[in-house]
Image (cartoon, coloured by chain):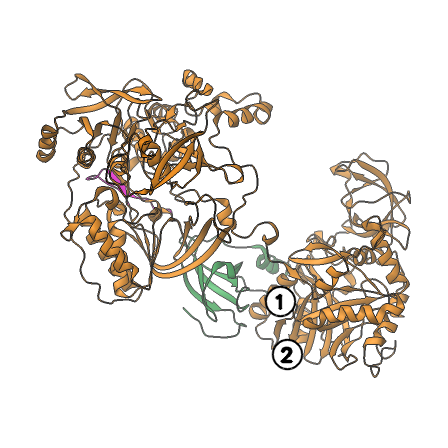
Chain colours: A orange, B green
Amino acid sequence: MTSSQSHRLASGGLIDRSASLNFRFDGRTFSGFQGDTLASALIANGVKLVGRSFKYHRPRGILTAGSEEPNALVELRTGARREPNTKATTAELYEGLEAASQNRWPSLRHDVMSVNQLFAPIFVAGFYYKTFMWPAKFWEAIYEPAIRRAAGLGRAAGVADPDHYDKAWAHCDVLIAGSGPAGLVAALAAGRSGARVILCEEDFALGGRLLSDGGTIDGVPAAEWLSRTLTELAAMPDVRIMTRTTLFGVYDGGTYGAIERVNDHLPSPPEHQVRQRLWRIVAKRCVVAAGALERPIVFAGNDTPGVMMASAMRTYVARYAAAPAKRIALFTNNEDGWRTVETALGAGLQIAAVIDARPDVSAAYRSLASKGGFPVLHGSVSGVDGGKDGVRKIAVSLAGGARAEVEADGLAVSGGWNPAVGLTSYHRGRPKWRDDIAAFVPDGAPPGMVAAGAANGDFGLGACLSQGFAAGVAAARDAGHSGKAGTAPVADDEAFSLTPLWHVTGKGKAFVDYQHDVTASDIELAQREGFESVEHLKRYTTLGMATDQGKTSNVAGLAIMAAVSGRSIPETGTTIYRPPYVPVAIGAFAGHHRDETFHATRLTPSHHWAMEQGAVFVDTGLWKRAQWYPRAGEKDWLESVTREVKAVRGGVGFCDVSTLGKIDVHGPDAGAFLDRVYINTFSNLAVGKARYGLMLREDGIVYDDGTTSRLAEDHYFLTTTTAKAGLVMQHLEFCRQVLFPELDVQLTSVSDQWAQFSIAGPKTRELLKEIVDPAEDLSNEGFPFMGAREVALRGGIKARLFRISFSGEMAFEISVPARLGDAMARNLMLAGAPFGVTPYGTEALGVMRVEKGHVAGPELSGTTTAADLGLGKMMSAKKDYIGRVMAGREALVAPDRQVVVGIKPTDKARRLRSGAHIIPKGQTPGPGNDQGYVTSVCFSPTSDQWIGLGLVERGRERIGEIVHAHDPLRGEDYDVELCNPVFYDPDGGRQRG
Amino acid sequence: MRIVCPFCGERELGEFTYLGDAKPVRPVAGASEDEVFDYVYLRDNVAGETSEHWYHGGGCRAWLKVARNTLTHEISAVEPAAGAGARQAVK
């Protein structure tokens, strides 16, 4: 298959020529080798055109060899795994890889939308704002969909991601970003010192630029030094090296974000393995050895396929043995660019010419040119003749003013290097300008972080080694490890010698931001129109706002802005750097928190029993609660719920209410404490009694309610609503620890320790007698309404029994240790069989509470006062309590407040729905006469009609009044009568009986 | 962000719940409506060192007083609330 790889070099490279891999790009089959990226394999096959640009649909090739790539973005994989905007330069080749170019129709070579280029004058910076302004209603309906269709890059899969993602934590002393020479020696030094080290490398191979540029370290070839170093690191048990892992963010307290592409290099993850893993790494120190990114020079036609960064070109030649071109020209403004010439010549490629913007070239390279027989032209590239098939000719403006032409099929460009200042700047740090390298370098860093080597602006191999090593030693020492680190490896520093050149003026489009199609003239236009600040420039032109975040474009863009606005580059400044450094899949942030594992699930103690009964479950917070228990032949939920309600009211039923929050309050001051958190008094509650309590927020609004029982002089058992269980615990701890530390009281959450069942209905006592020890007195005298005490069950198990009722029936709640909850449900069924015991769910529970006029979540809405709920009389005037003073404010005691009232439709057959607004009869509905709304509704089997509760202005004074229910959401209008909210057994005889 | 809980040691932000400014002191019983209003609603918008209440709900359930710089997020001191289990301040 190698024969098809027309641009594969005969030898060399870090590829495994014995492992040939087939892949498809835009439907054509190619082959490459293990060790290739998609980009290097395409290059090896002579493919130059890989995509169309965002706005103008210009043909684009491969610009870089790393994660900074703005051009070579493809849709990788197919079907549900199709991933748009994947960088071909980092996608590892695997057998059967399928990729497709983006943003073209009908094909990459013949793209209809390339006519956009003819309309280029209107696609200037800010053209959306200028062109699609009016009429406003066109924006959503016409402009935006059309623009999105025309300008979108890749297509999302459109179906759920079939793969799993993971999230994990890691901890270390020294975290290192990058495995180039600086990163490796930092790891070596820190590891030898005894520190726990994690090194993250985004590439699949370790070594950074050593893999492409080679060199000599400690007198041996870089490759040899590299393998020796990796062997030493591998032998250190506390050094963990993570490849395919990009450190993308820096957070407070030494927390870092990293994305590990665990299985992106395979067609699909092996069974039980994740595709990617999001790491949160906590490190005492961090060494950023993330290197530097070579930057383009802006000139006309600089986006022609075949124009490539000089360092990328030597990466493809040296590391991948793939020739991006066979006759190469180099355009450089610095000494480093020349290394590409050396590499290319070494690989037997032809050099057409070197266009050097500097007045002088070192003697060594001058002699290389004369030996290689190619000209050195002092000047700059002013245009490129070429198209979708690549570069053909290069126009050169010579320093003296003359023009020249160079024939070449590839153009390597080096405009210098920008240190990767992202990680060091993520805490709003602004990098500082260094004139000698004409680049921004880190100016400080988040606490605990330091940059070393090229990331710090020191590009020489010798400097990288000495700085990296020193940084590793210092980081380990700061983290408390000072073992013998030895000495730093030694290498020479290469010459850099750069004369800044950002932009060559000339005819034709000169691109700054390739991915967003921002040209030099767009930046000049932005300046003319007053968008001079870099932050404005960015947003007006979208410079640096694409998925590559301007890694190759930002500095050139602001250099051009500096030039046209007559300021220096440091005066112009940079925009704020923000994570993530590379795009991170939302799936990785979600991890396993999706679908049924989106959050933890809490199961009631009787859950499995309820499942056996065929219960329908409802999510209430984290809980799964049995909503109703359908029986064969029942046609809908209403029929089941109605049966359950009738069974309770006519006999006996039970319901798992373990989801209520339960708190043990212990201590000599327990009563005094409860007096301060509830509006009513608990210190005078007799032992063996329960009482309903209501607590307010400090602003006077109702917070939560529940019953609290006094089990001993210094022991209360408090219940909260299901929804607020955690919050009430937090609130009570705040009251105890912060507000009232002088009180001797302790709180214990026992929500999960007790299984609690409500047993309700006139036959409750008969059922209870079957399970409670006969010695216990359950008579009305022996266990009166609101009694609460520990009882023995038959068999000796201790339970807590509370005579409280939410249904309005004769009822008890019984608590047993949670592990006995399942057995309790089964025993209630057995013991209750002679009485026709019926398990009921939360729906029937809700129906009975509405029938009884009890308030619940919809009424405790965070806007209601105790008086609004009809519970104003509970507010003790004899003591201070949370919310007391604020509850007395004028508006909270105003006579026209919306208060709880009963609601029933005048047409008995009509269904009520919550949310309907209450309007005075005969008036046109509107905000001016909106007097409240329906909060809770149910079909009441007892009343044989729909009934509800509502919050209605002066509701309690208007009992009997007919008002209008207006439900614009459902398009319903009907009359209702305001009535007593207690529809069932208003004098409470049943629950006391 | 990481907080050094005086009882549990250094823990991750997700274990904690933020409440707000720890400076306002709840007025004694019988205080005027104005005093309570100030306590409930009035807060300084500090650029710099603040003292905040945090709750270690994912750990020991202690309420903590955390000295934090709102400009840098740097935490300079953490101490338990007066009524929390231990009385010893931990840096």
Q: Chain of mark 1?
A: A
Q: Amino acid at mark 1?
A: Leu
Q: Chain of mark 2?
A: A
SS for callout 1: helix
The magenta span reads: A428-441
Q: How many C-alpha atoms fall within 10 Å of the one at disc 1: few (<14), some, or many (≥20)?
A: some
| Count of numbered marks | 2
- Residue A903, placed above or below residue A404: below
Viewer-proximal residue among A436 and A951: A436
> Which quarter shows the C terminus of chain A?
bottom right
Res A49 quadrant in image: top left
Residue at 12%, 26% (x, y): give it. Answer: A373
> Which quarter shows the N terminus of chain A?
top left
Q: Position of residue A627 (x, y in %)?
A: 76, 56
Let me know if residue A435 is in the magenta part.
yes
Residue at 52%, 36% (x, y): give it. Answer: A156
Q: Amino acid at mark 2?
A: Gly
Viewer-proximal residue among A964 and A408: A408
Q: How many C-alpha atoms fall within 10 Å of the one at disc 2: few (<14), some, or many (≥20)?
A: some
- Residue A742, placed above or below residue A88: below
Of callouts 2 and 1, which one flags the residue occurring earlier in the amino acid sequence? 2
Residue at 45%, 43% (x, y): give it. Answer: A267
Whether pointer 2 and pointer 1 mark residues with C-beta atoms closer than 8 Å, the reply is no
Inter-mark Cα distance, 2 to 1: 14 Å
The residue tagged 2 is A667
Residue B34 shows in this picture = yes
In the picture provided, is A105 more to the left or to the right than A543? right
Asked if labels 2 and 1 share a chain, the reply is yes
